[in-house]
Image (cartoon, rainbow, N blue to C red):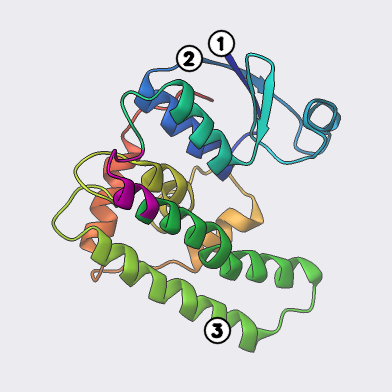
Amino acid sequence: MISVWLIPFSTNVERLSLALAHKGVEAEAIEVDPDGRREVVRVSGQELVPVADFDGEIVVDSPVILRKLEEVHPDPPLWPPDRARRAELDVFIDWFNRVWKVAPNAIAEAIEGGHPDQFAIDAHRAEMGAALAVFESLLEGRPYLFGNELSAADCVAFPFLKYAAVRDPADDELFHRILEDYQQLGDSHPNLAAWIERVNGLPRALP
């Protein structure tokens, strides 16, 4: 049994929740207080969730956890068998985490700091808007970001992009409100809107 430490409404936890459900793998959910993460630190030496325990092996960082899950439960796969395609998917995940997430994180930091630079915020808003066109193109003629089946790319991106179309009313986290407010689909992103609806309807393995 895989054990997972989590907090409510975590985008990174939802990545793992989608992946576990896709593979039909059960996991023990250990919910912690977002404002009191001593148990997470005790287990993993850091504060971020999810943290996963694979039979005594503690793994942190959601993409790393997804790769470990793929290793111990390879079917159905989240990475393609072809080596080149696997590398392409890894590049996408790295781009999403290291490049795409910069803009919304910067906006959140500016707002939380109390002295937001509107010029910088507008620049980040433009970056997020331009990225929507990239996702729209990736979904041209196929139901998921990398083809006809759910992949790690969908698990990684969906919990963030979904806010362009849906947000739980109980979820009032600033970062998530930014994802909602600064991603406007309109009528020019039908592929992305359909993908959000499609993935949103998939099962989850964690609360």
Q: Secondary structure at mark 1?
A: loop
Q: Nearer the viewer, residue 82 or 54?
A: 82
Q: Nearer the viewer, residue 156 or 184?
A: 156
Q: Looking at the picture, which amino acid does disc 1 mark?
A: Met
Q: Earlier in the sequence, mark 2 or mark 1?
A: 1
Q: Looking at the picture, which amino acid does disc 2 mark?
A: Glu
Magenta segment includes 67: no
* CB-based contact (under 8 Å), mark 2 and mark 1: yes
Q: How many marks?
A: 3
Q: Nearer the viewer, mark 3 or mark 2?
A: 2
Q: Please say whether residue 51 is visible from this viewpoint.
A: yes
Q: Please say whether residue 170 is visible from this viewpoint.
A: no
- Quarter-of-image position of residue 207: top right
Q: Nearer the viewer, mark 3 or mark 1?
A: 1
Q: Which residues are magenta?
A: 79-87
On the rendered structure, is 37 left or right of 195?
right
Residue 136 at x, y percent in the picture: 27, 64
Q: Secondary structure at mark 2?
A: loop
Name the disc covering residue 26, or none: 2
Badge 1 is on which residue?
1
Label 3 and label 2: CA atoms lie apart by 42 Å
Residue 147 at x, y percent in the picture: 22, 48
Badge 3 is on which residue?
123
* CB-based contact (under 8 Å), mark 3 and mark 2: no
On the rendered structure, is 4 left or right of 139?
right
Q: Nearer the viewer, mark 2 or mark 1?
A: 1
